[in-house]
Amino acid sequence: MWEGDAADVRRRNWILPSIVLQTTRVGDIHRSVTLLTESGLVRAMAHGAAKATSRLRAATVPFSYVRAYLYRDPVRDSVKLIDVEALALHHHLSGDLLKYFTASLWAEVVIKSHAGGLQPDQLQRRLLVALDRLDGAGADEVAEVSAAFLWQALEHIGVAPEIDLCSACGRHLADSEGALLHLADASLWCRSCHGEAAGAAGLVQELDAGLRGLFTVLRQDGASPPAPPPAAAAGATTVATSVTADVAELRHQEWDRLRRLLQQLMQHALERPLNALACAAGIL
Ligand SMILES: [Zn+2]
């Protein structure tokens, strides 16, 4: 029933594993859905999708992963979603504000960067891994999961900052050394160069050794997910457990700082504000 191949521009029917990034009401029962497929972004009409009995219902669940059956009308140059199979619904994202806004932010980043241009399949895989992790994450893990995806997205778009080299003098910074990051062009400056360039344009963010260390963790992890936080050792005493809890809390605060910094960097990279940040003021 499904015909043609990717090289055939006249092809009308497509079956594409897709992540639902956004759904918009069209009338009472229809939805326009924005999908991230392995070939890039697709906007498709899902007729009657909001009806309780609709077989397209999974496509109205934000951040679900579905197999989408699409029909492209060559005359109107529009795409219709005609069937859908749920592959992963990510049930815990819609009931948790922090997770919901986090996933919304990621979706907005993907849409506004036009899926990062080249190799949308890679971005799709990374987003899917991130959504799976976010779905199962505890409240204190969300910042780390979000920082990891935002970093990958910055790398994918090609605007991830260099965090070891001063962009002015080219010097390799020591691990213990703090630096300054210009948000406008994601350039890193050592302290002495920055002192000389007083009045340089753009917002500047202090990047202490702690944050630079977390950047290193993200970079080393690459496409693989960051390690889970260390679990308390079996048989630990009460004192040891509370020390572990303090360490975990500190670690969480550090990831939270990095997440906020990456959110700022992303807004500058996309050259426009991210609505999810405005909507979720104080949460993200
Ligand atoms: Zn320098």
Image (cartoon, rainbow, N blue to C red):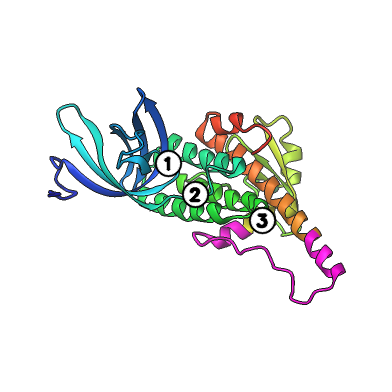
| Real-space CA distance between mark 3 and mark 2, rounded to the nearest whole angstrom | 29 Å
Q: Which quarter of the figure has residue 264?
A: top right
- Residue shown at the point (44%, 37%) measured from the top left: 113
Q: Is residue 115 magenta?
A: no
- Mark 3 / mark 1, whichever is N-terminal: 1
SS at badge 1: loop
Q: Is residue 188 left or right of residue 269?
A: right
* Residue 40 numbered mark, or none: none
Residue at the disc numbered 2: 91
Report crowding for label 1: few under 14, some 14 to 19, many 20 or more residues within 10 A (C-alpha).
many
Task: Give the spatial CA distance, label 3 vs label 1.
Answer: 33 Å
Of residue 77 and residue 69, the one placed in the foreground of this image is 69
Given residues 13 and 222, the one toward you in this image is 13
Q: Which mark is residue 214?
A: 3
Question: In this image, 53 relative to 273: left or right?
Answer: left
Q: Which mark is residue 61?
A: 1
Neighbour class for label 2 at 10 Å: few (<14), some, many (≥20)?
A: some
Q: Residue at x 81, y 59 (%)?
A: 246
Q: Earlier in the sequence, mark 3 or mark 2?
A: 2
Q: Amino acid at mark 3?
A: Leu
Visible residue check, residue 172? no
Q: Secondary structure at mark 2?
A: loop
